[in-house]
Amino acid sequence: MAFSLRNSSMTSARASRPCTSRRAAKVVCSAQAEGVNAKQAVAAAALACVVGLSAVEPAKADIAGLTPCSDSKAFKKREKNEVKKLTGRQKKYEAGSAPALALQASIERTEKRFDMYAKTGVLCGNDGLPHLIAD
C-alpha cells in the first residue's frame, strides 16, 4: 500500500521547512478502488460461496484403463479364485483342526479385504489388482 500526504499550503520552495499553517493533512490510500460497487462485491461473495460449498464427486477417472474395483470383472474373478484355492486347501484337513481353522480365518480375511477394496472405490486394472494413483 502506498500512502501519500497532501497539503495544499506546501510548495516546492517551502518543502524543506516545516509547515506553519494549521490546516489538516489529507491521507489518501491508493489501494482503495473508487469504482467498486456493492453489486460486484455481493456477486463475488456469492460465487465464492457456491464454488466453495459445492459437492465434490469421487474420482471416476478412466486413467490408463482403470475402472472401479466394484465394477471390474477381473477383480471379482481374482476374489473367486483366491477363495476357491483356500477352500480347496481347507478340505484336506479335518473340520475343527488347527490348520482348518487357520485357513477359515484366511478365507474370512480375504473376503473382507476384497469387500473393502470394492466399497472404498479403489481403481483396478485389467489384471484385477487395485492400483494406487500418485500425482
Image (spheres, rainbow, N blue to C red):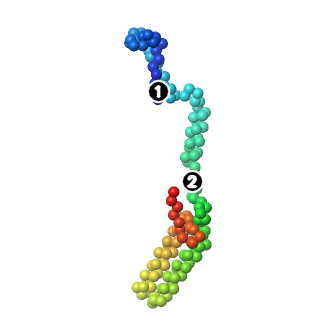
Q: Secondary structure at mark 1?
A: loop
- Depth check, front residue: 21 or 2: 2
What residue is pinned by disc 1?
2
What residue is pinned by disc 2?
56
- Answer yes or no: is residue 22 visible: no
Residue appearing at x 48%, y 85% in the figure: 90
Identity, as a three-letter code, of the amino acid under mark 2: Val
Q: Is residue 26 left or right of residue 77?
A: left
Q: Which mark is residue 12?
A: none
| Residue 46 percent coordinates (x, y) | 58, 40
Please say if 115 is above or below 43: below
Please say if 39 is above or below 117: above
| Residue 92 percent coordinates (x, y) | 47, 89
Q: Secondary structure at mark 2?
A: loop
Residue appearing at x 61%, y 65% in the figure: 65
Please say if 103 is above or below 11: below
Q: Residues within 10 Å of mark 2 (few under 14, many from 20)?
A: few
Identity, as a three-letter code, of the amino acid under mark 1: Ala
Please say if 82 is above or below 130: below
State which tag comes first along the sequence, 2 or 1.
1
